[in-house]
Image: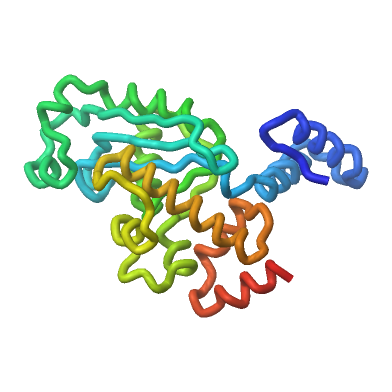
Amino acid sequence: MTFDIQSSDFSVFYWLIYIILPYHVTSVYNRLQIFMRVKHMQILANSTIVLDFETTGLSPNMGDRAIEIGAVKLVEGQVTKTFQCLMNPGFRISRFIENYTGISNAMLNNAPSCEEVMSEFAEFIGDSSLVAHNASFDKRFLDAELARINTDYSGDFACSMLIARRLIPDSPTHKLGDLVRFKQIENDGTFHRALADAQMTAKLWTLMVHELESIGIKNPSFSLMQQISKISKNDVYRFLKKKTE
């Protein structure tokens, strides 16, 4: 029996677990913790939000800010929503960043503030699981920008780059553009803009999920993708083989 976590079925599943839990598990907190672990196990990899930031530099700890956010919402592998917005960091960006991203100071002058955009983006992501290419970078900026507005998120992160290193080892590099070219993923040639990169990452992510399905792993979960990103590259084959047995 399977449950659709996007429907009321999953609420019924929660209550079934509540009823069958041993009587001694009386703490509401403990029960909620169990519910959340079960929910995490049930989240499918093909239903997630893929995001990308363009920024003024490499580190929010050094005063760098986000200047654009782009995101794609996937439901069962299909794009259902997108989010894209420039944001004014409150200071002029460098000529290097202008040339690298194609985002000019003139474009940012009339853009809404980071705080305004991130408030809207927090509503967009809700409690969804999150994916980014080189996720440690995007997560740092997401955490920093949301902290400025006293907002948090509950979804887990997965890194498409780390997963690609294990599932697509023959690619010359695992930069997003090189992976897109290596796997011949359809694109319009636009890179280093937030929505375009999020769209390319979403296509790469979906491709990797489909490749797992093609070797016999039915409905790969988000937690499985996280596990793949963390295991040794030398152990990937054995790990996936066990999952198909």
Query: In the rendered image, which quarter contains the C terminus?
Result: bottom right
Q: Relative to 122, is 183 above or below?
A: below
Could you say where residue 167 lies in the image, as x and y percent from the top left?
49, 67
Which sits in the foreground, 87 or 178?
178
User: Splitting the image into 4 quarters, where does residue 194 fall?
Assistant: top left
For image coordinates 43% across by 48% down, the residue present is 203
**Is residue 191 visible in the rendered structure shown here?**
no
Identify the residue at the far bottom of this view.
Answer: 234
Horizontal relation, residue 237 to residue 178: left or right: right
Residue nearest the viewer, comparing 7 with 63: 7
Q: Residue at x 32, y 47 (%)?
A: 187
Q: Residue furthest left?
A: 95
Relative image position of residue 145 (x, y in whole percent):
35, 35
* Horizontal side, residue 11 vs residue 135: left or right: right
Residue at (63% x, 52% y) in the render: 221
- 205 up-or-down from 80: above or below: below
Residue 227 place in picture, x, y as percent:
57, 62
Give the left or right position of residue 7, taking residue 79 as reference. right
In this view of the protein, can residue 84 be seen by the observer?
A: yes
Q: Count the marks.
A: 0
Using the image as rendered, state which of residue 129 and residue 198 is in the foreground: 198
Figure colour scheme: rainbow
Q: Quadrant of residue 8?
A: top right
State the residue at coordinates (76%, 40%).
3
In the image: residue 233, left or right of residue 147: right
Picture coordinates of residue 138, whole percent (x, y): 36, 46
